[in-house]
Amino acid sequence: MSAPSTQAAAAPTAPKKKKSSAKLKRLSGEALAAYNARIQNCGVCYIARVPPYMKPSARDRTKTCLWPWALRKLLSGYGTEVLRIYLKQEDPAARARRISGGGNRKRSFSEGWFADKRRALKLANTLNNTLVGGGHRSFHAQDLWSIKYLHKFKWDSLTDAQARNVASVA
């Protein structure tokens, strides 16, 4: 009889990743000044009312395409690409009242923000008080955009305020 093997079957291992030999370069004084000037010259757009049940960029079940009413897709259709979007979910008490009254169970958002000065300023001037559109059969056909550009308001200010709110609740 043969002796039992003392080694257990080894599990297959993932191939090791190569270490990147590229190092981060320090910014020169001029590049740092240009970066700081660009950061100081930014703004945020405030969406006072997000159309009902509109998502930031929801995907369908097959993960192949965006739903037709994804906010990012709608805003990007005006010649610019919106990079950062933050939508605030509706109040849980308001959602509970809506559901208990026989309303829709979908997530809804009360307000939102999107950033990048050049894009945000262009979209705010173009879209404020215009129809969301999409044709007369669309769910959002009669909704109006309510967008305001917030001058000298930084994206970091928004995220810091949200972090403070979460920390104060916890």
Image (tube, rainbow, N blue to C red):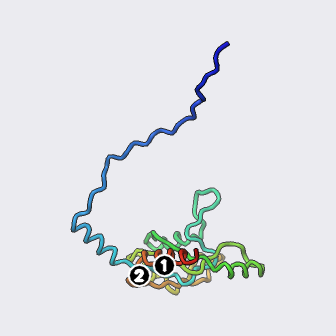
122 or 4: which is nearer to us? Answer: 4
Mark closer to the chain start, 2 or 1: 2
Label annotation for residue 161: 1
* Residue ID at (60%, 29%): 8
Residue in front for this viewpoint, 13 or 39: 13
Q: Residue at x 50, y 74 (%)?
A: 163
- x, y percent for residue 63: 60, 57
Count of residue discs: 2
Residue under the image location 30 percent in, 70 percent down: 35
Q: Quadrant of the N terminus?
A: top right
Q: Residues within 10 Å of mark 2 (few under 14, many from 20)?
A: some
Residue 88 versus residue 106: which sits nearer the camera? 88
**Image quarter of residue 95:** bottom right
Q: Quadrant of residue 49?
A: bottom right
- Camera-side mark, 2 or 1: 1
Residue 21: x percent and y percent? 32, 46
Tell me the residue that label 2 is attached to: 153
The disc placed on residue 124 is none
